[in-house]
Amino acid sequence: MQNLFDEVVSLDRRCYEEFFLSEDLLMEHAAGGMAAYIRENFPKNSKIIVVCGASNNGADGLALARILHGDYAVSIFYANKPKSAMALLQEKRAKSIGVRECREIEDCAVLVDAIFGTGFGGELSTELSILIEKMNQIKAFKIACDIPSAWVFKADVTLTMGALKKSMFLDETKERIGEIKVIDLGVSRSFYETKSNWRLLDLGDIKLPNREKQDVHKGNYGHLAIASGSKIGAGVISGLSALRFGSGLVTLVGYENPQIPHTLMYSHELPKNSTALAIGMGLGEEFSIIELDKFLDNNLPLIGDADIFYMPILLEILKRQSVVLTPHPKEFISLLKMTNIADISVEVLQKNRFFYAEKFCAKFPTAVLLLKGANVIIGKDGDFFVNPHGTSALAKGGSGDVLSGLIGALLAQGYTPLDSAINGSLAHALLSKNYDGVDFSLTPDELISGIGKLK
């Protein structure tokens, strides 16, 4: 896992005050790190254009151009003339060795965006909007210095300074950020960074179920009971996912007599040996209030999804000590409204995902929230995790039911709610990455089939 930060100005200041590193030294390390990436990936004499802004992000770009000058055909294009003290100093240094200024942006081997960093706020001017859109259309490998400018520039790679920023993992920025690499600023990240309650999950963090012990039977691996509603397919998908992910037994609980796969069980009553519950997937209005109360009249760990976010009984579910909730954005705004936290639109939520996840977890500290999206947010009380590894292949009906089954299986096997959410989410992402078909063709059946190949 890697730490995520709201801002790094305080981390830079710590370098000045505790490690006696000047702003100039940090900038030189930033530019040197970017130069090292270019040297490693592009041959000498490649044509490079660095587009520089007026402040310190532009100063980073000017320093980069100076370091590469002589080995690469590098030139500077000024989006704005230098204004900050460091930008003026770096311009003087670049000019002193003859780094040239170009008047037009054109196709090149590498195009570097060094216009705005994390300090940018407000709206782009018309001129800068036109410029950045032109940069997006240029044929080149595109590098963002620290972050893509105003989140309009579309980078192939972002070389970010010192530490990872939370803003890089908003859903709306995923299209623009590209691959992310962190540049050290003169000290190891272990010194530069401070403690953070937000962390980025790596695929290597996953802990899959194991069956190392041999003297066991199916009951040792839990029994997941799934409330089977009017859309029986959702419950079946979750059930098959859970069975595949190690749950010893899976029972759909309902009041019909549907045809289901023979590997799943069906009951009109909650099995007495149930170890976890799943509710909401395809639930509809199949259950009466009395029947729902009966299903939930226990202290078993529970995963709630889909329809449950529009039902008043959710407020009772939130009183449980072990609960995982997995809403997508529309379901989450319903949850926020129902719990009197906020009445907002999906658009407002998507621009403030971290804030509202924190608000919810502060009000319900025993619940685990898994907020779906291009970058999944998982939170409990004051600890938060971001899973950025899912792909657009998961944008298909039934994918969320597979996720519910993965999490439900882990709950049934005795994982904590937080570990169930983290490992279920990572498994879900891995399944999408491992799929070798075209992205639009992935189905829930293929996700479930892929579970057996996870490592």
Image: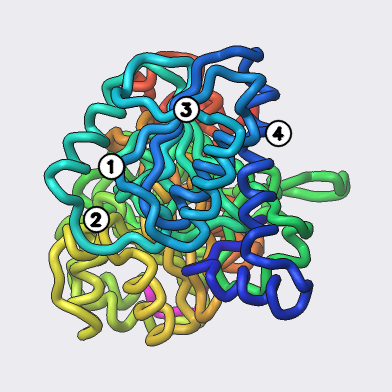
Q: CA distance from mark 3 to mark 2?
A: 66 Å
The quarter in which the C terminus is drawn is top right
User: Which kind of residue does numbered mark 3 sit on?
Assistant: Arg
Position in image of residue 120 (x %, y %): 33, 60
Q: Is residue 299 magenta?
A: yes
Quarter of image, res 41: top right
User: Which kind of residue does numbered mark 4 sit on?
Assistant: Lys
Q: CA distance from mark 2 to mark 1?
A: 41 Å
Q: Quick check: 131 above or below 291?
A: above
Secondary structure under the numbered disc 1 in the rendered image: loop
Q: Which residue is mark 2?
A: 283
Instruction: Indicate left or right for 285 with 9 as reference.
Output: left
Q: Quick check: 232 above or below 333?
A: above
User: Which kind of residue does numbered mark 1 sit on?
Assistant: Val
Position in image of residue 143 (x %, y %): 48, 33
Q: Which residue is mark 1?
A: 152
Q: Which residue is mark 4?
A: 455
First of labels 4, 2 by sequence position: 2
Secondary structure under the numbered disc 4 in the rendered image: loop
The part of the chain drawn in magenta is 296-300
Instruction: Please say if the residues under marks 1 and 3 sit with CB atoms less than 8 Å apart.
Output: no
Q: CA distance from mark 1 to mark 4?
A: 37 Å
First of labels 2, 1 by sequence position: 1
Q: CA distance from mark 4 to mark 2?
A: 32 Å
Q: Which residue is mark 3?
A: 100
Q: Nearer the viewer, residue 322 or 140?
A: 140
Mark 3 Cα shell of 10 Å, populated few (<14), some (14-19), many (≥20): some
